[in-house]
Image (spheres, helix red, strand yellow):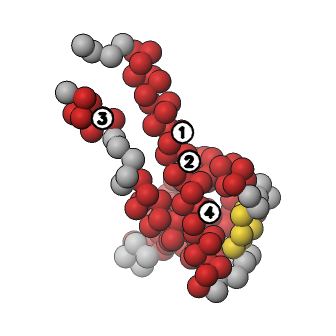
Amino acid sequence: MKPDKEDRGNQRTVQILIRWAVGAVALFLTVQLAQFVGVRGLAVKDVGSAFVVVLALTLVNAFIRPVVRLMTAPLNCLTLGLFSFVVNALMFWLVGALGIGLTVKGIVPALFGSIVLSLVGGVLNTFVPEKNEERRARD
C-alpha cells in the first residue's frame, strides 16, 4: 500500500524536526566540548536558545553563505579550499553576533565551534534514518 501525499508530508515534517533537534544537541555538545578543552568565548544560553540558534544558522547557511562563497571563490582556489573553514567560522560568528543566545567571542571560538559542530552534527545525523531507509525497513 502506497502512502498518500499527506502521510509523506507528515513524515517529512517529522524528519525536519528530528534533524533540528539533532542540530540543537550538536550545538549544545559543541559548547560543552569547547569548555572542556579550554576554548573560552563560546557559550549558549539554554536549550531553547540552541533551537533558535540552529534555525538561524540554517538560514544563514542557506542564504548568506552562498553569496560569501561566491565572492571569496578566488581566495578559496588560491588556498586549495582551506578558506572554506574561515567562511564557515564567519557564518558561525555572524549567528553569534545576532544576540539570540549564542556567544562567540573571537575567531578562534568561531573556528572551533564551526568545525566541531559540523563533526558532531555529522556523527549524530548518521543515527537519523533517511526517508528511503524507512521505506526499505517497512517493505
Secondary structure category for the residue under label 4: helix
Alpha carbons under labels 2 and 4: distance apart: 11 Å
Choose the circle earlier in sequence order: 1 or 4.
1
Q: Residues within 10 Å of mark 4 (few under 14, many from 20)?
A: many
Asked whether the residues under the numbered discs 4 and 3 touch, taking CB atoms below 8 Å apart as contact, a structural biologist would say no
Q: What residue would you read off at disc 2?
A: 21
Q: Position of residue 88 (x, y in %)?
A: 54, 66
Task: Work out whether mark 4 precedes mark 3 in sequence or the reverse, and give the earlier one.
Answer: 4
Question: CA separation, marks 1 and 2?
Answer: 6 Å
Q: Which residue is mark 4?
A: 28
Q: Secondary structure at mark 1?
A: helix
Q: If the image is split into quadrants, where does the C terminus sit?
A: top left
Extreme residue in the front direction? 138
Please give the name of the residue rendered at 52% of the width and 51% of the height, measured from the top-left corner.
22
Q: Pointers 1 and 2 in contact (CB under 8 A)?
A: yes
Kind of residue at disc 1: Leu
Number of the label disc, if any, that sits on residue 17: 1
| Mark 3 residue type | Glu
Contact check, label 1 and label 4, Cβ < 8 Å: no
Q: Position of residue 77 (x, y in %)?
A: 39, 72
Q: Which three-letter amino acid code belongs to the residue tagged 4? A: Phe
Circle 2 — which element? helix
Instruction: Name the amino acid, label 2.
Output: Ala
- Whether residues under marks 2 and 3 lie with C-beta atoms below 8 angstroms apart, the answer is no
Q: Quadrant of the N terminus?
A: top left
